[in-house]
Image (cartoon, rainbow, N blue to C red):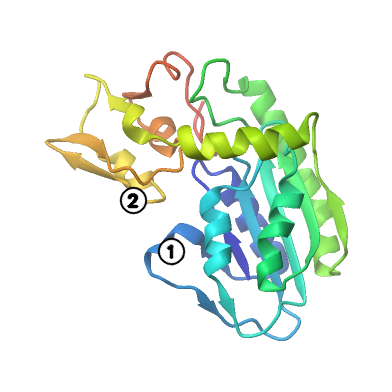
Amino acid sequence: MIFYFSGCGNSRHVAETLATGLNDQLVFIPEAERENRYEYTLAEEERLGFVFPIYSWAPPKLVLDFIGKMNLNAKPSYVYFVCTCGDNCGQTEKVFRQSLEPKGWELAACCSLQMPETYIGMPGFKLDTKENAQRKIANADAKIETLLPRLLDKGHFSDMIVGGMAWLKSKLINPGFNHFATDDSKYRSTEQCIHCGRCVEVCPLKNITLEEGRPLWHGHCTICMACYHHCPVNAIQYGKSTEGKGQYYFGIES
């Protein structure tokens, strides 16, 4: 069974590819959360996997919170995660292991995959070029092909792109990001808005509604930026940080 979260599609692509290769069931974490589905039954020796993007050098808080609420019929015999990142992951492995400790679960394997950048909500953050995005996707797909037999064999490994200043990024910067940088009050729609409701459809947390034809955010945001990237006319901005930076989501037509 694979539990996953994705906003702009990178991690969804990875989760779907793994599910096909491993013949595993997929569970979308935000949907399960909305439906209060925390009880799960694993077959004997069934793998328990998690797939998610890196948010500020750690797993998204909503993923860790969901794990804390999960109840299984038995202790899983094999737990792994695969994460996607634009660059590196900091101490994600350590943070994830710590989230499993209260459950009595043990992490057997983990892997990070570089995928096209999606977070541009602060000055200095920008998207990959088209060429770099295509290269990252091709490399990630090739790496998944080598990853599948290792997971099928229930191998124990850590294949993470940690990067420099890992402790500083994951232990100091990440908590600040979760506290201050997930404020959706900075989102706005410009006069270009065509009232299509695409932002409402793609928000994984169902945090957006249309009010008089314009998007309204309701304070339950993880800053996945799906609304920004999927807007067909680029009418959504996050303060001034996203202006002129372009859009990306997995499968976007260039």
Specify the label residue 127 is tagged with.
none
Say if 205 sits above or below 50 in the image: above
Could you classify mark 1 by the number of other residues whose Cα lies within 10 Å: few (under 14), some (14-19), or many (20 or more)? some
User: In the rendering, at what x and y percent does residue 144 appear?
Assistant: 76, 51
Task: Determine which residue is flagged by label 2.
Answer: 206
Residue visible at 50% across and 34% down in the picture = 252
Q: Residue at x 32, y 31 (%)?
A: 185
Query: Who's the residue at 54% across and 34% down the image?
Result: 177
141 left or right of 200 in image: right
Q: CA distance from mark 1 to mark 2?
A: 11 Å
Q: Is residue 164 above or below residue 70?
A: above
Q: Is residue 140 above or below residue 131?
A: below
**How many numbered markers are drawn?**
2
User: Which of pointers 1 and 2 lies earlier in the amino acid sequence?
Assistant: 1
Question: In the picture, residue 32 is in which quadrant?
Answer: bottom left
Mark 2 crowdedness (10 Å alpha carbons): few <14, some 14-19, many ≥20: some
Can you give x and y, in whole percent of width and height, for residue 115 in the image?
A: 66, 36
- Give the residue drawn at x 57%, y 51%: 12
For the residue pair 216 and 141, the one nearer the viewer reads as: 216
Q: Are marks 1 and 2 in contact (CB under 8 Å)?
A: no
- Which of the two residues, 148 or 167, is positioned nearer the viewer here? 167
The amino acid beneath tag 1 is Glu
Where residue 137 appears, as percent x and y from the top left, is: 68, 37
- Residue 217, by quadrant, is top left
Q: Nearer the viewer, residue 19 or 210?
A: 210
On the question of residue 127 being in view, the answer is yes
What numbered label is drawn on residue 33? 1
